[in-house]
Amino acid sequence: MRNVYAMLGLFAVAAAVFFGLRSTAPSAAPVPAPPRELPPLQLIQRIPVPGVTGRIDHFTAFPKRRLLIFAGLGNNSMEIVNTFEAKVVQSTKGLDEPQGVLYVPGLDKIFVANAGNGTVKVYDGKTYALRKSIALGEESDTDNLRWDEDSKRVFVGIVGGLAMIDAVTEAHVGDLKGSGGHSESFQLEKKGSRVFVNVPDDESVVNVIDRKTGELTKWGLNGVKANYPMALDEDNHRLFVVTRRPPFVMILNTDNGKEVARVPVGGSCDDVYFDVERKRIYALGGEGFISVVQQNDPDHYSLSANIPSAVGVRTGIFFGTS
């Protein structure tokens, strides 16, 4: 049986503890102990997920309904957890190597990318019934999913680029061509038309694709390799790319692709998130901890902490506290 760990970023003031001084002399004023500094992430909950074996891949969530949804890659299942009740409320089996999952609140639909047969399955968000299976090709290796609110499209990471699905009609409406190799994590601009795509198979580059014109630009990573997870700070024009050989978070300027900084993080990372409110980067490493990197300003970064998790835990989701 596997467990899902819930961790929360907290800002709190530790209560001072006062110690009385034993002495035959007149009593001195109590001396306060220094406040204990809390780690940037604290474990708040463990939720068992019975019957789930093997590797867990990517997550999605619907905070308003307290739902956490993840792809049971090794279990060929999609699991839905109610975090308030701390239990699994739905287990959908019979999938084929599910990797990416995406919940779209406005349409109340769940999209699941199946790498084994190259399909994206669409489920009803209330009944969890299968609505449609969209074939993208058996060799497409469907993976990460992202939502674009403006176009009402779901973008799917595949071999050779990105597939686009109309979330309303549930139809495959076209592809964006990349430089080759399998597309790993990617991020869409909200204020622009570009999409940034990690392509470790193609000499570990970042593809920059214009969603309107299809124009492709490639950015190198100055010798580091195996770039899988990615996060974006669009307001400050910064792209966060985590590599595995060696393990760094690479900070790139999105105006020109140039490296701004690099910070060592835990190895075997497969998910990374940017906490806009606290200016933190959370890199989930399979070596057994979450690396917390502080953005001091857009050009300067420092490792704040390595928070223990569990060996092999390299995926998760961050959706804030507000």
Image (cartoon, rainbow, N blue to C red):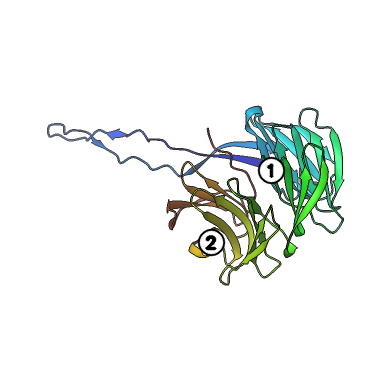
Identity, as a three-letter code, of the amino acid under mark 1: Trp
Circle 2 residue: 250
Is residue 157 found left or right of 279 in the rendered image?
Answer: right
- Residue 298 placement (x, y as % from top left): 44, 54
Instruction: Name the residue at 80% across, 43% down.
Output: 77
Q: Quadrant of residue 130?
A: top right
Circle 1 residue: 147
**Residues packed near mark 2 inside 10 Å, few (<14), some (14 to 19) or many (20 plus):** many
Q: Earlier in the sequence, mark 2 or mark 1?
A: 1
Instruction: Name the residue at 69% across, 33% down.
Output: 105
Identity, as a three-letter code, of the amino acid under mark 2: Met
The correct choice, above or below, for 226 with respect to 136 in the image is below
Can the viewer see residue 222? yes
Q: 87 or 174, which is in the foreground?
A: 174
Mark 2–mark 1 CB contact (< 8 Å): no
Q: Which mark is residue 9?
A: none
- Residue 231 placement (x, y as % from top left): 58, 52
Secondary element at image label 2: strand
**Residues packed near mark 1 inside 10 Å, few (<14), some (14 to 19) or many (20 plus):** some
Instruction: Name the residue at 82% across, 40% down.
Output: 170
Marks 2 and 1, Cα distance to the nearest angstrom? 24 Å
- Residue 17 placement (x, y as % from top left): 32, 34
